[in-house]
Image (cartoon, rainbow, N blue to C red):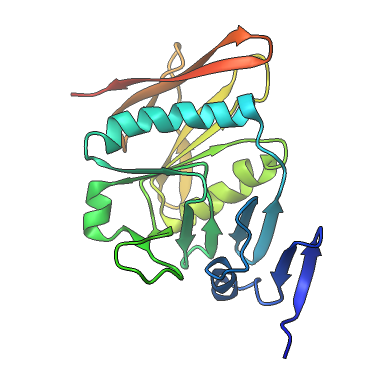
């Protein structure tokens, strides 16, 4: 019997009928039919598809700066792992399957099983495609197509999944950019109030951070994730 599909986008993105359950979405995400481009998230029964291109300077450049600093502070020092782009985070408890902009899993979380790599459809030894459970830190960078998801829906689901720390960055404006660190208290996130110089403390990383940017030429920004790590 031919497989039926509920939705077809632009003749090449076919969404199966059973994707509105966590199990159904995961079967699709692990199959050969799952798209290799675009961001497709499962949020408590809803499937959100974003095929819009990534803004180079309000999104991509910010993500690169954050990932580079995280790598030097965490992965390069064997404190844990840093992932970006096409790294899926799944939580059956939170009914969530998403691809965050940046994801950090510290070594103690890996050792205790709080967060663990999963293989999905690839059964080869030591080959993984997703993180299951609660990573230590997730970063979401707001784009025009994801404002409501990044600032309202995802925080609720990340909190339900038990993610201890959530960073939200919005660099779309030409004035001050938004850089917020939220820490999980009970079942909801609480904003880490920045000081007068814009520094916000990250309990999971053990230091304070702020993002700065400068023009290098028209329409081109350079971002820096500055840090003060506690001894």
Looking at the image, residue 154 sits to the left or right of residue 139; the answer is: right
Q: Position of residue 42 (x, y in %)?
A: 60, 61
Q: Position of residue 187 (x, y in %)?
A: 45, 52
At x 51% / y 19%, what residue is drawn? 223
Q: Nearer the viewer, residue 141 or 186?
A: 141
Q: Position of residue 212 (x, y in %)?
A: 49, 15
At x 38% / y 55%, what residue is drawn? 134
At x 49% / y 55%, what residue is drawn? 88
Can see residue 202?
no
Above or below for 68 versus 15: above
**On-image quarter of the C terminus:** top left
Q: Which residue ends up furthest to the bottom in the rendered image?
A: 1
**On-image quarter of the N terminus:** bottom right
At x 42% / y 33%, what residue is drawn? 67
Above or below for 70 versus 9: above
Above or below for 194 versus 125: above
Q: Nearer the viewer, residue 137 or 198?
A: 137
Q: Picture quarter containing residue 150? A: top right
Q: Picture quarter containing residue 17? A: bottom right
Can see residue 61?
yes
């Amino acid at each position: 019997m031919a497989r039926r599909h509920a939705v077809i986008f632009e003749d090449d993105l076919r969404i199966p009928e059973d994707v509105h359950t966590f199990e159904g979405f995961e079967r699709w995400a692990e199959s050969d039919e799952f798209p290799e481009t675009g961001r497709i998230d499962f949020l408590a029964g809803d499937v959100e598809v974003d095929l819009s291109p990534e803004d180079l300077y309000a999104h991509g450049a910010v993500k690169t700066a954050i990932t580079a600093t995280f790598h030097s502070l965490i992965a390069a020092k064997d404190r844990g792992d840093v992932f970006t782009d096409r790294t899926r985070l799944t939580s059956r408890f939170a009914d969530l399957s998403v691809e965050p902009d940046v994801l950090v899993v510290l070594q103690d979380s890996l050792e205790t099983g709080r967060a663990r790599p999963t293989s999905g459809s690839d059964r080869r030894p030591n080959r993984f495609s997703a993180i299951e459970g609660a990573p230590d830190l997730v970063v979401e960078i707001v784009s025009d197509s994801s404002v409501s998801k990044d600032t309202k829906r995802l925080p609720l689901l990340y909190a339900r999944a038990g993610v201890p720390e959530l960073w939200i960055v919005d660099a779309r404006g030409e004035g001050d950019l938004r850089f917020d660190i939220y820490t999980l208290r009970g079942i909801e996130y609480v904003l880490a109030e920045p000081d007068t110089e814009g520094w916000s403390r990250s309990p999971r990383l053990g230091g304070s951070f702020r993002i700065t940017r400068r023009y290098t030429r028209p329409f081109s920004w350079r971002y820096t994730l500055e840090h003060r790590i506690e001894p």
